[in-house]
Image (cartoon, rainbow, N blue to C red):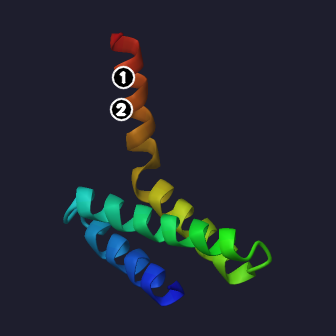
Amino acid sequence: LKELAEAYLKLGHEYSYGNVNAEKAKTSFKKAETIARNLIELDKNDLDARDLLVRSLWQYDEYYGWRDRDERSEAISQD
């Protein structure tokens, strides 16, 4: 499963780089995050899974964090 999550991270990066496909990139990063969280649930001491989770969250935030925060802030201010 770790290899699959790594592949999702790579896909997310490739889709994000140059804004090729933001929705596919976000989906790939979130799938990597889900896999990492599930691996941690199975073994809380799995440092590789924890590293995978950190990297998936960091990469998502690196590409989309500020956009997502801006969109949420804008939606709240419109309410």
Assess disc 2: are there few (<14), some (14-19) or many (≥20) residues with their C-alpha within 10 Å of its C-alpha. Answer: few
The residue shown at (59%, 75%) is 52
Position of residue 47 measured from the top left corner of the image (x, y, whole percent): 74, 80
Tell whether 54 sits left or right of 11: right
The residue shown at (45%, 59%) is 60
Question: Judging from the image, what secondary structure is the residue with disc 2 in?
Answer: helix
Tell whether 59 sits left or right of 63: right
Residue picked out by circle 2: 71
- Count every numbered label the image shows and give the total: 2
Q: Please name the amino acid that badge 1 sits on.
A: Glu
Tell whether 21 sits left or right of 59: left
**Circles 1 and 2: CB atoms closer than 8 Å:** yes
Q: Which mark is residue 74?
A: 1
Q: Is residue 73 above or below residue 48?
A: above
Q: Quadrant of the C terminus?
A: top left
Assess disc 1: are there few (<14), some (14-19) or many (≥20) residues with their C-alpha within 10 Å of its C-alpha. Answer: few
